[in-house]
C-alpha cells in the first residue's frame, strides 16, 4: 500500500519537514531489536540537526526519526488528505533484526 500512496504523493516530497505539517515516509532504524513502523504518518513537532520528531498516528505517540535512517524523503500530507490516510491501514510494524 505504501508504494501506491507514495506514487500519489510524488509531487510533494519535502526533504526537511516543517513543524505543524503532516508527513509520511519510509523508515528503517539502525537500533537493533527495536520495534518500528516502516511507514510512519506523523504530525511534525520538531526539526533538529539529527533529524525530526513527531506524533506518529499509527503508534499514537511521539517518535524521533534521524536523517540517516530515512528510506524516502518525507512526503507532505495536506490536511484534507490526513483523514483518508488515517483510514488506510498502511502501517508496517517490524522488529529490526540487524
Image (cartoon, grey):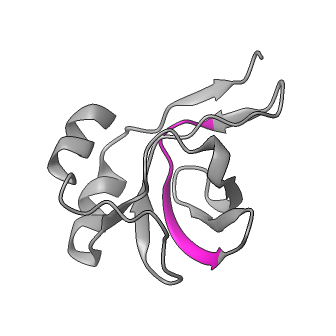
**Quadrant of the frame with the N terminus:** top left
**Quadrant of the frame with the C terminus:** top right
Residue sitting nearer the eye, 33 or 16: 16
Position in image of residue 42 (x %, y %): 50, 62
Q: Is residue 1 visible?
A: no
x 76%, y 15%: residue: 97
Question: Which image quarter: residue 50?
Answer: bottom right
Relative side of 21 to 57, left or right: left
Residue sitting nearer the eye, 92 or 30: 30
The residue at the far bottom in this view is: 20
62 magenta-colored: no
Position in image of residue 86 (x %, y %): 36, 56
x 31%, y 66%: residue: 77
Position in image of residue 75 (x %, y %): 35, 58
Relative side of 45 to 18, left or right: right
Vertical placement of residue 95 versus 76, above or below: above
Vertical placement of residue 90 versus 96, above or below: below
42 magenta-colored: yes
x 49%, y 69%: residue: 16
**Dominant secondary-structure state across the stretch colored magenta:** strand
Residue sitting nearer the eye, 46 or 68: 68
Vertical placement of residue 68 versus 75, above or below: above
Position in image of residue 88 (x %, y %): 30, 45
Q: Is residue 58 visible?
A: yes
Question: Which image quarter: residue 29?
Answer: top right
x 24%, y 58%: residue: 84
Q: Which portion, as a residue range, is magenta?
A: 37-46
Amino acid at each position: 500500500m505504501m508504494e501506491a500512496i507514495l506514487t500519489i504523493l510524488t509531487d510533494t516530497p519535502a526533504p526537511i519537514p516543517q513543524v505543524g505539517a503532516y508527513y509520511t515516509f519510509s523508515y528503517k532504524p539502525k537500533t537493533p531489536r527495536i520495534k518500528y513502523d516502516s511507514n510512519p504518518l506523523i504530525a511534525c513537532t520538531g526539526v533538529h540537526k539529527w533529524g525530526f520528531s513527531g506524533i506518529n498516528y499509527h503508534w499514537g505517540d511521539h517518535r524521533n526519526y534521524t536523517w540517516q535512517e530515512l528510506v524516502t524523503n518525507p512526503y507532505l500530507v495536506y490536511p484534507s488528505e490526513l483523514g483518508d490516510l488515517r483510514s488506510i491501514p498502511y502501517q508496517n510494524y517490524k522488529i529490526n533484526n540487524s
